[in-house]
């Protein structure tokens, strides 16, 4: 960075205290040498002790394993003797004579053991050795035998105190355990003598190799083996030693330092390692004198101290000569170079884009790697050129206000501009800048930070917030619409029921009949509008059933022909091929009705034609891109075409939006196509539209085909619903709406039923409790103030088990259907369809 060096001179005036720096450096070096020497010595000591610890624990584990193996073999031989006694006695009692007989024939099973001994419950003993087969001996001098005889229930083996055998003087360690025959009778003590020499040989080998003190100590505090060996140590009681007390309460293995344990003089500091023998009351001990452990460490420490002293002397002399010959100018130059190099390193390796601009000629004189990467330039193509020549400003005119702010304040931050890199990519950047004086004049530090992705993310976040607010608004509208539709259905049920019965009573020639017909048409339209509202708010439960598509379309067309004006021709192009789809027939009829109504209105009062068709369509790899969300396969293609005015592309993009309509105020809700789109999506299908202004519109609906018709599918009947004649069965009807009570009472009486009506749940339950009333079927409203229809049905099931129950509601949900099934209701009736469906539903329910 040749250009940066003179600039740094003006920013960095180094300290003139070179002597102080050198003295401090020398002091630190000496302190470091002392500290390093001390740390090395301490670390070496720790490593030496750690190595000794690992070696000691390994050795003591070998000792423990050796002792455990010998004791396990001895215990196993006693067990073998017990099995031999049991085998000998078979079904006869195990007498002393039999045991002594077996003992006479028994011999040790390995060379470690020297004899077997049996002591009966009276204390009489018999011994078998390799040299002296069974003979009588006195067991009174063996304390462990007396202990076992007093504790016949103890099953664990017991070790005695080692002693020299009287007939040959060999040191032995007795191992004994209680013996009870298989029939549970206690006979005495079986024991064996283990030669201490087999411990000593192994222990002496380890002790000599490591110059260590090795011993085997019982938990009662007497020595069994001690190497280097002295006869006076064998059987020595050390239980009074504080070290032994600490050892008894210690962990299974470990180490400690001491100088008065297992040692005659008690003056030699030692490092003791111990491990308790698993399964036996013994502890193996391995100890080495601290002087021997640290002998090598002492030698190395002396060498390190000598080397450290030499280094201290060297540093002292070097510092002395440097202080004499250093000059202030040289010290300043070195300090300045260090500062320049430090600043240059920070500048070049900073992750923030940085560049220097000489304001005198507006040229870039330096740029770091982050800056060059941001603008996709090489240093040789960038340095020495102006922003205008490089074209890094998207609009160079935007630079003038930026320069004016710098000229006024000398600095600026968070100034947002649009810049362009060498690839022509626009970047939204936040710029910070600072002006300073140097030998080359005024220099500008220019730092742009690319926030393009951040701004894009913020834009996406705002879009998501708008979508969330829109979704919340639609959810609120749906909730409101569902509530309104529920209340409106109750009103429509009363209107349709009363008008229907009035139409049956009034002949077609009567002047009032025309008014009644108009009221009925308006109510039917209102009922359809309520269904659209429920579908839009997704409150209407789906009743998916695998069924043929053609009957649904045919039935809808028959309804359409009765309502379309004569000027509108309706053509049907229905394939004879069976097209089976999983669908809700009512909702598909609503889709067709909505599309045909829209097509009829598109004719704008003139003559025209509506075409409805269905056929099989295979969706392959070259399908319409608008259908890319559908899996490839066979579909039922349903279309509705009109010869109306058509739509522009702008309108086609919005027609499925809720509440969007092109009709004048009061002539459209904007829900029709939104409902159509929702129903088709719920059927796992897709809907597209093709239209041109003046050439009509065609809606295409694709529904996935299924293999076969559902077992419970019933073909739609073409006959109009009639009032089934009742057989004087007694029907009890409960509803809090007085108008509905009157209407249903008249309707059911016309159908030939005896009817009792209640407006309160308690009244209805009282009637049901009276068996004399002879109620054959109970109908209840769902939404009532005191209790819901489900709660009433549950009480009826307890009061009159087996009584058929029907539930009526103006708002049927999946939760209501599940609840009705749970309480045993036979069916759920849409209240707005009471006139058409209730009499037939009652007859089917009563007939079972």
Image (cartoon, rainbow, N blue to C red):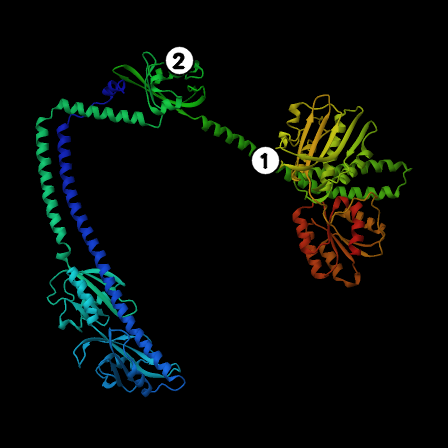
Query: Is residue 812 in sight in this rendering?
Result: yes
Q: Earlier in the sequence, mark 1 or mark 2?
A: 2
- Which element is circle 2 on? helix
Q: Residue at x 12, y 65 (%)?
A: 266
Judge by depth and name the residue closer to the eye, 240 or 257: 257
| Residue 527 in the figure: left or right of residue 156 | right
Q: Which residue is mark 2?
A: 388
**Dividing the image into 4 quarters, which one contains the N terminus?**
top left
Label number found at residue 471 = 1
Other residues around mark 2 within 10 Å, as few (<14) / some (14–19) / many (≥20): few
- Image quadrant of residue 276? bottom left
The nearer-to-camera label among 1 and 2 is 2
In the image, 556: left or right of 182?
A: right
Vertical side of 169 occupied by 460: above or below: above
Residue 298 versus residue 675 in the image, above or below: below
Give residue 751's position: percent from left, percent from top.
84, 51
Using the image, determine if residue 95 lies above or below residue 705.
below
Looking at the picture, how far across and down is residue 330, in whole percent?
A: 14, 23
Which residue is more in the foreground, 256 or 436?
A: 256
* Total numbered badges shown on the rendered structure: 2
Q: Point out residue 573 in the picture as x, y percentages from the top left corner.
A: 78, 33
Distance, label 1 to label 2, CA atoms, is 48 Å
Residue in view at x 45 percent, y 28 percent: 453
């Amino acid at each position: 960075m040749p250009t940066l060096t003179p600039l740094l001179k003006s920013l960095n005036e180094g300290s003139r205290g070179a002597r102080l720096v050198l003295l401090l450096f020398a002091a630190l070096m000496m302190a470091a040498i002392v500290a390093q020497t001390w740390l090395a010595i301490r670390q070496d000591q720790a490593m030496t002790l750690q190595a000794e610890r690992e070696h000691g624990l390994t050795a003591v584990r070998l000792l423990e394993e050796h002792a455990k193996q010998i004791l396990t073999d001895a215990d196993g031989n006693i067990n073998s003797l017990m099995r031999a006694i049991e085998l000998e006695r078979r079904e006869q009692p195990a007498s002393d004579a039999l045991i002594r007989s077996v003992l006479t024939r028994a011999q040790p099973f390995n060379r470690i053991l020297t004899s077997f001994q049996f002591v009966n419950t009276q204390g009489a003993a018999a011994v078998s050795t390799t040299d002296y087969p069974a003979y009588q001996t006195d067991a009174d001098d063996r304390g462990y035998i007396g202990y076992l005889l007093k504790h016949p229930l103890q099953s664990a083996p017991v070790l005695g105190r080692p002693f020299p055998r009287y007939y040959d003087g060999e040191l032995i360690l007795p191992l004994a355990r209680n013996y009870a025959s298989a029939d549970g009778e206690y006979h005495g003590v079986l024991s064996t003598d283990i030669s201490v020499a087999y411990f000593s040989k192994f222990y002496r080998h380890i002790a000599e190799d490591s110059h260590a003190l090795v011993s085997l100590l019982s938990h009662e505090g007497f020595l069994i083996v001690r190497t280097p060996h002295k006869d006076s140590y064998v059987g020595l009681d050390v239980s009074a030693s504080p070290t032994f007390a600490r050892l008894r309460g210690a962990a299974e293995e470990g180490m400690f330092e001491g100088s008065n344990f297992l040692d005659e003089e008690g003056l030699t500091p030692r490092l003791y390692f111990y491990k308790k023998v698993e399964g036996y009351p013994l502890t193996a001990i391995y100890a080495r004198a601290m002087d021997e452990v640290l002998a090598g460490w002492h030698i190395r420490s002396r060498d390190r101290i000598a080397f450290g002293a030499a280094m201290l002397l060297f540093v002292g002399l070097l510092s002395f000569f440097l202080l004499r010959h250093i000059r202030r100018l040289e010290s300043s130059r070195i300090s300045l170079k260090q500062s320049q190099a430090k600043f240059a390193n920070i500048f070049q390796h900073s992750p923030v884009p940085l560049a220097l601009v000489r304001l005198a000629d507006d040229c870039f004189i330096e740029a770091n790697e982050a800056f060059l990467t941001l603008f996709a330039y090489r240093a040789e193509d960038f340095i020495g050129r102006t922003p205008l020549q490089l074209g890094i400003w998207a609009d160079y005119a935007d630079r003038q206000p930026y320069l004016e702010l710098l000229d006024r304040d000398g600095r600026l931050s968070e100034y947002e501009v649009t810049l362009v890199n060498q690839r022509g990519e626009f970047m939204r950047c936040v710029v910070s800048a600072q002006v300073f004086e140097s030998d080359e004049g005024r220099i500008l530090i220019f730092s742009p930070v690319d926030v393009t992705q951040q701004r894009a993310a913020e834009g996406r976040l705002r879009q998501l917030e708008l979508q969330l607010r829109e979704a919340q608004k639609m959810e609120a509208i749906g909730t409101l619409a569902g509530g309104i539709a529920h209340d409106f259905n109750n009103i429509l049920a009363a209107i349709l029921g009363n008008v229907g019965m009035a139409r049956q009573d009034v002949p077609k020639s009567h002047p009032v009949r025309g008014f009644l017909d108009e009221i009925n048409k308006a109510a039917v339209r209102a009922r359809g509008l309520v269904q659209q509202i429920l579908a839009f708010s997704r409150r209407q439960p789906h009743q998916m059933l695998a069924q043929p598509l053609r009957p649904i379309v045919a039935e809808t067309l028959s309804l359409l022909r009765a309502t379309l004006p004569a000027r509108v021709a309706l053509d049907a192009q229905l394939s004879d091929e069976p097209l089976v789809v999983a669908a809700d027939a009512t909702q598909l009829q609503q889709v067709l009705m909505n599309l045909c109504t829209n097509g009829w209105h598109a004719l704008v009062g003139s003559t025209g034609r509506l075409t409805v068709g269905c056929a099989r369509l295979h969706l392959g790899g070259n399908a319409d891109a608008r259908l890319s969300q559908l899996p490839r396969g066979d579909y039922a293609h349903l279309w509705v075409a009109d010869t109306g005015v058509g739509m522009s592309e702008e309108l086609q993009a919005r027609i499925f939006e809720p509440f969007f309509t092109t009709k004048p105020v009061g002539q459209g809700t904007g829900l029709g196509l939104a409902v159509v789109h929702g129903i088709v999506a719920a059927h796992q299908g897709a809907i597209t539209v093709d239209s041109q202004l003046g050439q009509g519109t065609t809606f295409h609906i694709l529904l996935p085909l299924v293999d076969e018709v559902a077992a419970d599918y019933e073909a739609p009947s073409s006959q109009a619903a009639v009032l089934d004649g009742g057989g004087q069965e007694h029907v009890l009807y409960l509803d809090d709406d007085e108008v509905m009570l009157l209407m249903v009472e008249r309707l059911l009486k016309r159908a030939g039923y005896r009817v009792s009506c209640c407006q309160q749940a308690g009244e209805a339950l009282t009637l049901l409790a009276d068996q004399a009333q002879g109620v054959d079927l109970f109908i209840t409203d769902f939404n009532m103030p005191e209790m819901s229809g489900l709660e009433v049905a549950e009480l009826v099931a307890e009061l009159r088990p087996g009584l058929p129950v029907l539930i009526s509601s103006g708002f049927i949900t999946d939760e209501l259907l599940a609840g009705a099934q749970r309480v045993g209701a036979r069916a759920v009736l849409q209240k707005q369809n009471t006139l058409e469906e209730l009499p037939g539903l009652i007859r089917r329910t009563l007939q079972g």
